[in-house]
Image (tube, rainbow, N blue to C red):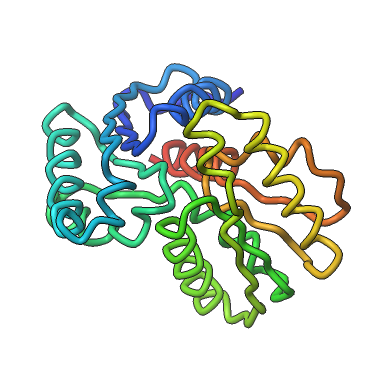
Amino acid sequence: MTSTTPATRVAFLHTGAVVIPPVMELVGEQLPGLSTVNYLDDRIVADLADPAHQESVAERLADLAAAAKSAGADVVMFTCSSISHLAAPTAEKAGIPVLRIDEAMADEAVAAAGRVTVLATLPTTLEPTLGLLRERAELAGTTPEFVSEVVPGAFEAVAGGDRAAHDRLVAEAIERHAPTSDVVVLAQASMASAAEAARVEVPVMTSLRPGIARLAERVQAG
């Protein structure tokens, strides 16, 4: 365990309630005693795919980040890959640093410049994740090959309450792509449970643990 900077408060901004418990569990492991506050807008992912509401998302994120700042937060962390591309403009509007939970995962994935397969259950998450991977690859000076797939039926399964079917479908996709991949990236934190079901030899990367580890490094640095 590590100690935290007592004055630090971190606000987590979520687009789905399912990710809050695992994030808080990891924070408890890696940053015991950290002051946290959670914000949830569970319409964001749907609205990103709806032309009538897309433009409202950036403003809503800025408002939530501003609320976090007013509540004493020193930093905000986005826990959803679908909004990673909005971190910088949100930080600029709200006047508070905004971190991306999937950035550390992306750095690990592109480090070897091999073939990276990206799996998602929603198109609205796949494109931002690919964008982040390309951004981090450029910064690292690497040139990975990217392959991607939206796993058919997986989102519908989990949205209907069938987590087992979701995990099976995602695990099957992992196993299908693994023989021709150097690493498999799961674009959504909610997909992490499927990684445990897949029987593959290549690394299967998820965002939560490396993301919170990087947050811990920042908090400890002061």
In the picture, which quadrant includes the C terminus?
top left
Residue 152 versus residue 116 in the image, above or below: above
Q: What residue do we see at 55% from left, 54% from top? A: 120
Relative side of 102 to 184, left or right? left
| Frontmost residue, 77 versus 157 | 157
| Frontmost residue, 72 versus 118 | 118
On the image, the x and y values in percent for residue 75 come to 29, 41
Q: What residue do we see at 26% from left, 40% from top? A: 43
Number of disc labels = 0
On the image, the x and y values in percent for residue 124 come to 40, 58
On the image, the x and y values in percent for residue 129 come to 48, 61
Residue 121 versus residue 143 in the image, above or below: above
Relative side of 94 to 191, left or right? left
Q: What residue do we see at 82% from left, 56% from top? A: 202
On the image, the x and y values in percent for residue 176 come to 80, 59
Residue 24 versus residue 145 in the image, above or below: above
Res. 66 image quadrant: top left
**Outermost residue toward the top in this view:** 33
In the picture, which quadrant includes the N terminus?
top right
Q: What residue do we see at 52% from left, 47% from top? A: 188
Relative side of 73 to 145, left or right? left
Relative side of 204 to 93, left or right? right
